[in-house]
Image: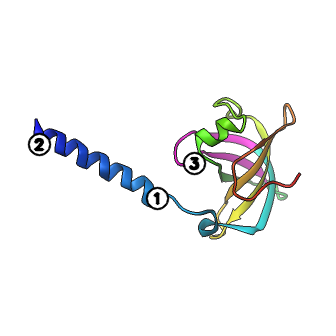
Amino acid sequence: MGTKLAVVICVAVIAASGRVVAHHSFAAEFDENKPVKLTGTVTSVEWTNPHIWFFMDVKNPDGTVTNWGFEMASPNSLLRAGWKRDSMKIGDVVAVEARRARDGSNHANAQAVVLTATNQRLFAGSPIPPAQ
């Protein structure tokens, strides 16, 4: 029994340490001097720790569509800020205020999300406060 317990503890420690190593600071990944405001249709919502991510299709001026990914705070933080797991669903049209990724990819850290159907504005948990 002692060997099985030791194996379980080792696996748990390794799994937990992966989350800690994977976590990053805002400044390491996003540039507060690169604001972006986009409106699009939600294609995916991932309610996972340490951060919630959602993805949306944004129509470009030339008619093409680009899929953007937005990082938000942890599930617990967003629940305390008024979010519900079903606040944003696939197919919803949302407007997002965010800060772009430093690497130039189509990723950003969301500051505020406006659910266009209800005009409800929700804080997304970014360390940079959204403009009012």
Which dot marks residue 51? 3
Using the image, determine if residue 72 lies above or below residue 78: below
Which residue is denoted by mark 2 in the rendering? 3
What's under tag 3, amino acid-wise?
His
> Dot 3: within a 10 Å radius of its alpha carbon, few (fewer than 14), some, or many (20 or more) residues?
some
Residue displayed at 65% across by 47% down: 55
Q: Quadrant of residue 78?
A: top right
Image depth: mark 2 or mark 3 in front? 2
Relative to 60, residue 116 above or below:
above
Residue drawn at x 18%, y 45% as measured from the top left = 7
The colour scheme used here is rainbow
Q: Main secondary structure of the magenta part?
A: strand
21 w.r.t. 4: above or below: below
Mark-to-mark CA distance, 2 and 3:
34 Å
Element assignment for label 2? helix
Which stretch did the figure color magenta? Answer: 41-59
Q: Which corner quadrant of the image does residue 18 belong to?
A: bottom left
> Dot 1 lies on which element?
helix
Q: Amino acid at mark 2?
A: Thr
